[in-house]
Amino acid sequence: MRGSLQNLLRNALRSPGGRRGTIALVVLVVAALALPPFLQDPAAIPDASRGALPPSGAHWFGTDLLNRDVLARLLTGARFSLGIAALATVLTATVGTGVGLAAGYAGGAVDAVLMRVADAALAIPRLFILLLLVLVWDRVPPAALILVIGLTGWFATSRLVRSETLRLRREPFVTAAEALGATPWRVMLTHLLPNAAGPVIVTATLGIGDVILLEAGLSFLGLGIQPPTPSWGGMILESRPVMTIAPWTAIFPGVAIIVTVLAANLVGEALRAALDPRTA
């Protein structure tokens, strides 16, 4: 499994899009982790009477309506936006993979029930489900937001893993493992899961961009990360009163969302192309 995943990643990085997307994501993650301690406190309000100041040597990305440093808030918000996207995607991939393995390997009634649940959930727009769930809380904590986003996105992954499991379950190496007395858990975890990991990684990478957009959209609606904690969607929401006279307060978080989603999609598409035998 390790060798096949290494080959997948190596082949993906050979493409220009994969390299550019990876570099952009690495730079953003390193900046979000390393730079905030050297910048102004993102919650500090030095002088609210001065309002939004344009980009300058003192504030490279300017300040917002409350005179808070936009760059500091942008990078601190990146921690929340990227962290929520990564953890929610891992949760989605884990649940979807488990359900897909169980449905594909068990078959029969188990397969029918699990897939009907997934089909019913796929028929309902995900954003509608999210809005219904987050409205339960007045202030949604980050952990709850991760659970809500992660547990509403596994349906397509489960169908993908199920199809891979159905394809693999009659392969000679699986039949041999069963003949030697391997338990169903061992067969699924040792023989089926490694061979289904590639498509799951591709789907999860492409899903990161969707989760970032979902989190930003919820925060823009006031249902995601709550102020004063910065998030990219929340920063755009807070910029609305001064968007015409201080456009930088919305431009920079908007560009951050676009660049991050584009980078994640470039990496995902490169992984998909590397996994496609027609491009090998």
Image (tube, rainbow, N blue to C red):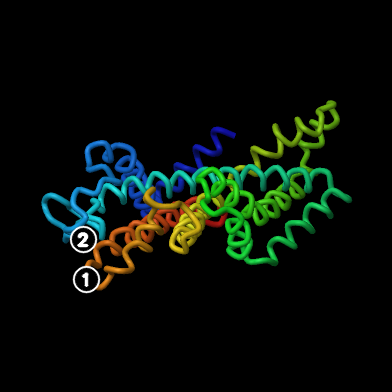
x, y (%) of residue 173? Answer: 75, 35
* 121 sits left or right of 259 in the view: right
Question: Alpha-carbon neighbours of circle 2 within 10 Å: few (<14), some, or many (≥20)?
Answer: many
Q: Secondary structure at mark 2?
A: loop
Picture layout, residue 141 above or below residue 127:
above
Which image quadrant for residue 30? top left
* 3 sits left or right of 235 in the view: right
- Of the 4 image quadrants, the one containing the N terminus is top right
Residue 7 visible in the picture: yes
Q: Nearer the viewer, residue 192 or 50?
A: 50
Q: Secondary structure at mark 1?
A: loop
Q: Residue furthest right?
A: 109
Q: Residue at x 37, y 48 (%)?
A: 78
Picture layout, residue 51 above or below residue 10:
below
Q: Amino acid at mark 2?
A: Ala
Q: Nearer the viewer, residue 216 or 67?
A: 67
Q: CA distance from mark 2 to mark 1?
A: 9 Å
Q: Amino acid at mark 1?
A: Ile
Q: Which residue is mark 2?
A: 52
Circle number at residue 245: 1
* 187 sits left or right of 124 in the view: right
x, y (%) of residue 106? Answer: 83, 44
